[in-house]
Amino acid sequence: MIAKEEIAEWLKGLQDRICASIEAVDGGGQFKEDLWERPGGGGGRTRVLKGKLIEKGGVNFSAVHGAMPEKIAASLGFTDTEFFATGVSIVMHPQSPMIPIIHMNVRYFETSAGKWWFGGGIDLTPIYVVEEDARFFHQTLASVCDKHEEAYYPWFKQWADDYFYVKHRKETRGIGGIFYDQLNDQEGSSQEELFEFMKDVGETFAPLYVELINRHKAEAYDERQKLWQKLRRGRYVEFNLVWDRGTRFGLDTNGRTESILMSLPPEANWEYNFEPEEDSPEAFTQSKLVKGIDWA
Amino acid sequence: MIAKEEIAEWLKGLQDRICASIEAVDGGGQFKEDLWERPGGGGGRTRVLKGKLIEKGGVNFSAVHGAMPEKIAASLGFTDTEFFATGVSIVMHPQSPMIPIIHMNVRYFETSAGKWWFGGGIDLTPIYVVEEDARFFHQTLASVCDKHEEAYYPWFKQWADDYFYVKHRKETRGIGGIFYDQLNDQEGSSQEELFEFMKDVGETFAPLYVELINRHKAEAYDERQKLWQKLRRGRYVEFNLVWDRGTRFGLDTNGRTESILMSLPPEANWEYNFEPEEDSPEAFTQSKLVKGIDWA
């Protein structure tokens, strides 16, 4: 059995590597770090960037433990005396509407009775869907998954479609990606193998996003595109505050609010009954915010 | 017993009168109306203003009925075959940070087994708390309440403090106001008396808000004040999407999303770990976002 401290240490290193890659591609600001402690045990390292290309980016590491809160027990359907949870969470909100928003999370959970599992995912929210990017994004995730288990990509792709769904808008948050939760050895993989999978997902993030940034960072954009970005960011806020279980769980259980809500965009708009013009690029994007598209 | 149709008709008239008053004080745009139908029964009249002083204002009337959805039954703790619900909901987001955001809701609920109750409230969210305004606002509400029941104002004022609370920020949404729910004849007032109370609360809205607008509409403001407004609007979004039971209930039960979310501001900001400067007007406002201040 891998010690939980080893997983947490690896995640800290991942946070360092990702921050370095993002700073390098951004070419502007530097991440600012806040260290924080959780009253019940453990703490974290929140890093936030106000950059040149990245208007607001957050890369959060945490490793928390302690008596299992009632709400965790209720959400799991069982209770145990102690829990340990560690993970890295990322959301990047670029300045330019031509560069997509991205989110990644990898996490590990363990209880004092010896239960454990991994969870995670990467999903992309383009302001303008570019089919070539969408294929590249999903193909990259598919090949990471395929290295470990052939069943993973189709399974986790659908899971992402279902998870990142803005139910009250009847649309997906973006073009999806992969999402998985509570993976343990009941699925046929050992803890070691699942840790290797976490590592591969985690290490995929930086080169994948750097590539997408480089594809679009030189593109010009206008007011209309910026407005569409702010409206799409409004939907991002709606998903995170209304439907994202991680966010709601954190806010419900007295998590560190500023670290949880660093996922929110720097600026978002709401316009009553906004409808993109017919046959516009905005309408094209809207038409792709549905489940079940086979991008890979 | 007052027919539910009579209450709905009165609410329609209230919507008309309030829209006329707001258009008059705004001096700019006109409300645009959307009529909508609820698939399960009933519908509504959503009116939205993009004005000169009011950047985004919504005044929504609805009267819906039908088979009682499971979620309503669960939230009430009992089930019944049919329900009827009618109300007027208002949120005003002014352009100027010197003019407060305001919200009002009055509603009536009835079931086919003859259960009925009233609910409602008015609360104020100043971007900059002005003590004289806060006193005027609360004194106005107190005198409306006192006309009906001496117990109402202290009771409903505390209810508002507790309801309009952004738990994960440990702050109130604004300076509160009044909030009440499930008022029926078990509290000692007849249906007629409670309908009269609804009328008085409803009719108080327009003159109260017009007075607050007139007090501040000529004031200049700068970039810093506008930024603070957008950050406060971010908190408004957080409250509405995370904690407001009405909003969540509507989104959960397939309500008309655009009518429910017309409460969201036209533009909102989030800045990681923003702290107002010491002894600034922003810090003063922050210090007043607590429960239990006796403004009246």
Image (spheres, coloured by chain):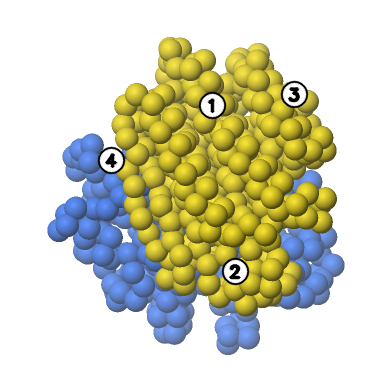
Chain colours: A yellow, B blue
Q: Which residue is mark 1?
A: A207
| Image quarter of the C terminus of chain B | bottom left
In this rendering, position of residue A156 left or right of residue B168: right
In space, the residues marked 3 and 4 are separated at their CA atoms by: 44 Å
In this rendering, position of residue A247 left or right of residue A175: left
Foreground pick, A79 / A258? A79
**Residue name at image x 37 percent, y 59 percent:** A36
Of labels 2 and 1, earlier in sequence is 2
In space, the residues marked 4 and 2 are separated at their CA atoms by: 44 Å
| Secondary structure under the numbered disc 1 in the rendered image | helix
In this rendering, position of residue A152 left or right of residue A124: right
Residue B94 seen by the camera: no
| Residue type, numbered disc 3 | Ala
| Secondary structure under the numbered disc 3 in the rendered image | loop
Q: Which residue is mark 3?
A: A296
**Residue name at image x 28 percent, y 60 percent:** B286
- The reply to whether discs 4 and 2 touch (Cβ–Cβ < 8 Å) is no
Q: Are marks 1 and 4 on the same chain?
A: no
Of labels 2 and 3, earlier in sequence is 2
Foreground pick, A255 / A16? A16
Q: Give the label on residue B17, or none.
A: none
In space, the residues marked 1 and 3 are separated at their CA atoms by: 18 Å
Q: Are marks 1 and 3 on the same chain?
A: yes
Q: Are marks 4 and 2 on the same chain?
A: no
**Residue name at image x 15 percent, y 58 percent:** B279
Q: Chain of mark 1?
A: A
- Point out residue B73 in the picture as x, y percentages from the top left corner: 76, 68
| Secondary structure under the numbered disc 2 in the rendered image | strand
Q: Which residue is mark 4?
A: B226
In this rendering, position of residue B115 left or right of residue B248: right
Q: Give the label on residue A83, or none.
A: 2
